[in-house]
């Protein structure tokens, strides 16, 4: 069995091939976290991440990681500027 044949049978079951494909390229940090969570059970997660790194993907969720401007980031912050009067962090005091 060739790799292509194996992948053809597997693709419909992969999380990124079920539902809304825009979830993997969402602007909302909550949606991106949801996509990352769906990747955790994916059987080709490592291969997906390796291929995304090799292709230098500019953005999206690949292999359970968020790419932003070609760099893996832990979390994506919301659009816009941070609040001017951010709530104080009690742990920092």
Image: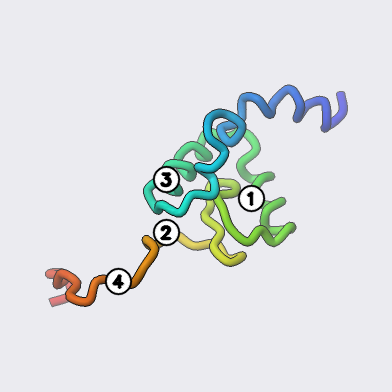
Q: Give the alpha-carbon distance from disc 1 to disc 4, as whole Å.
A: 30 Å
For numbered disc 4, what is the local secondary structure? loop
Residue shown at 83% from the left, 31% from the top: 4
Look at the image and tell me in which quarter the C terminus lies: bottom left
Check the image and report above or below for 46 versus 20: below
Is 72 in front, or is 43?
Answer: 72
Which image quarter is the N terminus in?
top right
- Residue 32 relative to residue 4: left or right: left
- What whole-number distance in Å separates the C-alpha atoms at marks 2 and 3? 11 Å
Q: Residue at x 42, y 42 (%)?
A: 34
Q: Determine whether label 1 and label 3 are within 8 Å by CB.
A: no
Q: Measure the C-alpha gap from mark 2 to mark 1.
A: 16 Å
> Residue under circle 3?
31
Q: Earlier in the sequence, mark 1 or mark 3?
A: 3
Q: Which element is circle 3 on?
A: helix
Report crowding for label 1: few under 14, some 14 to 19, many 20 or more residues within 10 A (C-alpha): some
Label 1: which residue? Answer: 49
Which numbered disc, 4 or 2, marks the residue that appears first in the sequence? 2
Left or right position of 84 against 70: left
For marks 3 and 4, give the CA distance: 19 Å
2 or 1: tag closer to the N-terminus = 1
Of callouts 2 and 3, the N-terminal one: 3
């Amino acid at each position: 069995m060739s790799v292509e044949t194996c992948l053809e049978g597997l693709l419909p079951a992969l999380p990124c091939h079920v539902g809304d494909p825009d979830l993997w390229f969402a602007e909302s940090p909550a949606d991106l976290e949801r996509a990352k969570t769906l990747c955790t059970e994916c059987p080709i997660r490592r291969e997906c991440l390796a291929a995304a790194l090799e292709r230098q993907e500019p953005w999206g969720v690949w292999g359970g990681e968020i790419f932003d401007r070609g760099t893996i980031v832990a979390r994506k912050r919301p659009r816009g500027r941070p609040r001017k009067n951010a709530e104080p962090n009690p742990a920092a005091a």
